[in-house]
Image (spheres, rainbow, N blue to C red):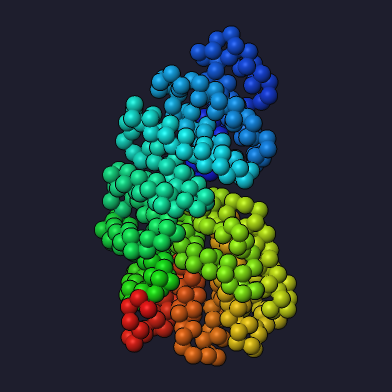
Amino acid sequence: MTPAHGAPSDHPAPRARRSGREPVTDEMVARLRVQARTDPASGLPALAEALRGRAYGRPEPRPEDAVPLLEESAGIYRALVADGCTEHLAAAARALASLALQLSLAHADGPALAARREAADLARRAEADQPVEGLGQAAVLHADLAHGLAEAGRFDEAVDAARTVADRSRAVTEPGGSDLAWRLLDLTVLLRLADRTEEAVAVEHEALARLREGRTDPARSPVPALRTAGAALWFADLGRAEQSHRLLADAARSCELLPARGDAGDFGFNEGLRSALFARSGVRDEQAAADAPDPLALGVDPGRPLQPVLGLSLHHWSFSLRESFEDGLATLARAVEAVIGRPEPTDHLPDEDDPSEHPDDPLPLPEDRALLAALGTLTRRLDLRRAVRGDHPTYYAHLTLPRLRRSVRIERRLHATGPTDDTHRLVRALTDLAMAQLVHGAHAEATATLHEAHTLAVRPEAPEGR
């Protein structure tokens, strides 16, 4: 599978470190400073690249250490390309992209966005001078720019940048290639944030059509079922019940073509895709929570609504790179604890549907219907945030599936105790669970879960768009 978009892992340390040579040290930088003074033509580019390498000299670079080095590197490159020289444009774009990431992690929003814009422009100039055959650095950095603009709340500009990337991907992605699917998924999220829902729906229909026309074999890969289930989840959120119902049936049929048990060969890609689809359907959850009564507004800062922006690892969407994201996660966990009367585990949650777990004391659920509904909403928001943190769980069956099964249990209880208006909540929880089962390779279980969701979703009396 090809990388999705301009995630931080698309901006690794310089080539010298990737090729297995010694990491850049302070002594190396000092020697190159001397060379830059005595032989600027060779010394300055080498120093700029070394400074970038030194900024990433730790396993987890800290912004306070990395930003000064990257600012110096970017300054050198700016001078090198200021007179129209094209030789160092691509390297300059990489340096500015690295600086933008660290500035964003340091919460310097304005400078980070300016650096992203400059990086994308430098890459565009580089490819105008030397055209590339594939997607190219300029498109990847325009994807970064789109997410930076979205984080700043400039959604229409973000859409323009993302559409540029999608157009480029259409031109260079082979049939069945994964890159365009990711670009179109990004574009639907940004269009939704810009309140351009009909355009987003049109892009989603294009993505589904390309999936059907592509080379992905539904008898071997869970991606068609996963992608279609994610579309059903989103269309249900938009109130398009008939389309959602039809897509759930398509997803179940795709599942039926899979072997009962799959392997974990593409686990990272599949889990990343699930997280992105899950986050897209959760845009509404996070936005609505800002105006919701307590406890549903917990973890959301009304002064700065958390918007989906590129997450901390490849293929993941996150609601913020900020500390407020982690703070909100902890606040939501405490709210769940207050409802259920016991601590909310941060790692292993006993799986009540797994006989090997044998929980002696199953999760207590409140009798009060309003509290039960609040618990269902809180746990989904918790699951949503956990899914997009950037952690690829090693033990998926212990970390992800039990939580989604818990959500299904809550929604089943809610559905059994009240009117059928809550059916859509149970259908959503079942679809969430089925997508995770597909990632886990539990294809037979996912098929049964999707069939149940499809059956529950039959509401012929509900007009389309309600």
Place of residue 186 in the rendered image (x, y in percent of width and height, measured from the top left): 42, 54
Q: Is residue 125 visible?
A: yes
Q: Report the residue at 58% width, 72% height from top.
A: 292
Asked if 379 appears above or below 124 in the picture, the reply is below
Extreme residue in the top direction: 38
| Quadrant of the frame with the C terminus | bottom left
Please state if 172 lies on the left or on the right of 229 as rendered.
Answer: left
Asked if 26 appears above or below 139 in the picture, the reply is above
- Numbered marks: total: 0
Place of residue 139 in the rendered image (x, y in percent of width and height, measured from the top left): 39, 41
Q: Report the residue at 42% width, 81% height from top.
A: 452
Q: Residue 298's image quarter? A: bottom right
Place of residue 419 in the rendered image (x, y in percent of width and height, measured from the top left): 49, 90
Please state if 463 lies on the left or on the right of 35 as rendered.
Answer: left
The answer to which of 213 and 71 lies nearer the viewer is 71
The answer to which of 188 and 404 lies nearer the viewer is 188
